[in-house]
Image (spheres, helix red, strand yellow):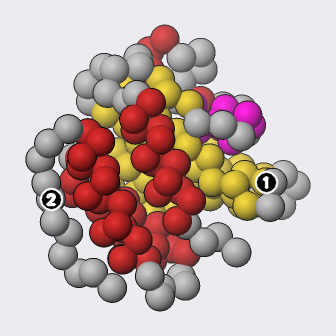
C-alpha cells in the first residue's frame, strides 16, 4: 500500500494521470470496501482540495421497505445522511445510472443543499452486476468546476472499486 501521495501541479489531465496509479497502489491488496472508499476520498481531497468528496451507498431504509443512499466515507463539511432515489443530483444519478455534471447547482431542479458553499457538482454511479450500489459525489465551491476530463478520469477511479 502506498502511504504517501505525490501531489503534482499541471493540467487537469496530467494531474489525473499521476493520481490514478497512486490510487490503484493504495487499493492494491486491500479487500475492505469502506477502507478503500475512505482512502479514495482522502486522495482526491489532497490532490484537488474540492469542497466535499464522498460516497453514498445504496442500503435498505430504516424500516426496510425500500432503498436509499446512505452517507459513506467522505472528506469535507457535514453532509446529508440519507437521500431518496431520484432526489437531488445524487438520487438522480442513482436513478438514471449515469454520471451527472452540474455546472451550477442552483439551476438543478430539486438540488439538495447540504452545504450553501456548494456551487457545482459531479456525481458518478458505482455499478455492480447492472445495479447502482452507490455514488461518488464531489462538490466544488466554484461554478463550472467539472467537465468531461473529470468525468473520464473519475469513471476510471470508480472502475477500480471492488464492491463484490
Task: Provide the secondary structure element on which disc 1 rests.
Answer: strand
The residue at the point 60 percent across, 20 percent down is 110
In the displayed orientation, state which residue is furthest to the left: 9
Residue 51 in the image: state x and y as whole percent: 28, 41
Task: Provide the secondary structure element on which disc 2 rests.
Answer: loop
Q: CA distance from mark 1 to mark 2?
A: 34 Å
Residue that label 1 marks? 131
In the displayed orientation, state which residue is furthest to the top: 107
| Count of numbered tags | 2
The residue at the point 58 percent across, 49 percent down is 135
Residue that label 2 marks? 7
Q: Which of pointers 1 and 2 indicates the residue nearer the eye? A: 2
- Tell me, yes or no, whether the two marked residues, 1 and 2, touch with CB atoms within 8 Å: no
- Identify whether 73 is placed above or below 90: below
Question: In the image, is residue 93 part of the stretch drawn in magenta?
Answer: yes
Residue 51 makes an appearance in the image:
no
Q: Which residues are magenta?
A: 89-96
Residue 52 in the image: state x and y as whole percent: 34, 45
Identify the mark at residue 16; answer none if there is no mark. Answer: none
The residue at the point 66 percent across, 37 percent down is 98
- Identify whether 125 is placed above or below 142: below
Determine the image quadrant of residue 7. Answer: bottom left
Classify 10 Å Cα crowding around label 1: few (below 14), some (14-19), many (20 and above): few
Residue 74 in the image: state x and y as whole percent: 40, 58
Quadrant in which the N terminus appears:
bottom left
Going by the image, does 158 lie left or right of 9? Answer: right
Quadrant in which the C terminus appears:
bottom right
**Of helix, strand and loop, which mostly describes the magenta segment?**
helix
Amino acid at each position: 500500500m502506498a502511504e504517501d501521495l505525490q501531489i503534482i501541479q499541471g493540467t487537469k489531465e496530467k494531474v489525473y494521470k499521476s493520481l490514478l496509479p497512486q490510487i490503484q497502489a493504495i487499493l492494491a491488496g486491500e479487500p475492505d470496501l469502506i477502507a478503500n472508499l475512505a482512502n479514495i476520498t482522502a486522495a482526491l481531497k489532497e490532490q484537488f482540495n474540492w469542497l466535499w468528496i464522498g460516497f453514498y451507498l445504496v442500503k435498505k431504509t430504516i424500516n426496510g421497505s425500500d432503498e436509499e443512499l446512505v452517507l459513506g466515507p467522505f472528506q469535507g463539511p457535514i453532509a446529508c445522511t440519507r437521500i431518496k432515489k431520484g432526489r437531488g443530483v445524487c438520487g438522480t444519478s442513482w436513478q438514471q445510472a449515469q454520471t451527472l455534471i452540474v455546472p451550477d447547482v442552483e439551476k438543478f431542479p430539486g438540488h439538495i443543499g447540504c452545504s450553501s458553499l456548494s456551487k457545482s457538482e459531479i456525481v458518478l454511479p458505482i455499478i455492480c452486476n447492472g445495479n447502482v450500489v452507490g455514488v461518488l459525489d464531489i462538490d466544488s465551491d466554484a461554478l463550472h468546476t467539472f467537465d468531461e476530463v473529470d468525468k473520464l478520469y473519475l469513471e476510471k477511479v470508480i472502475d477500480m472499486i471492488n464492491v463484490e
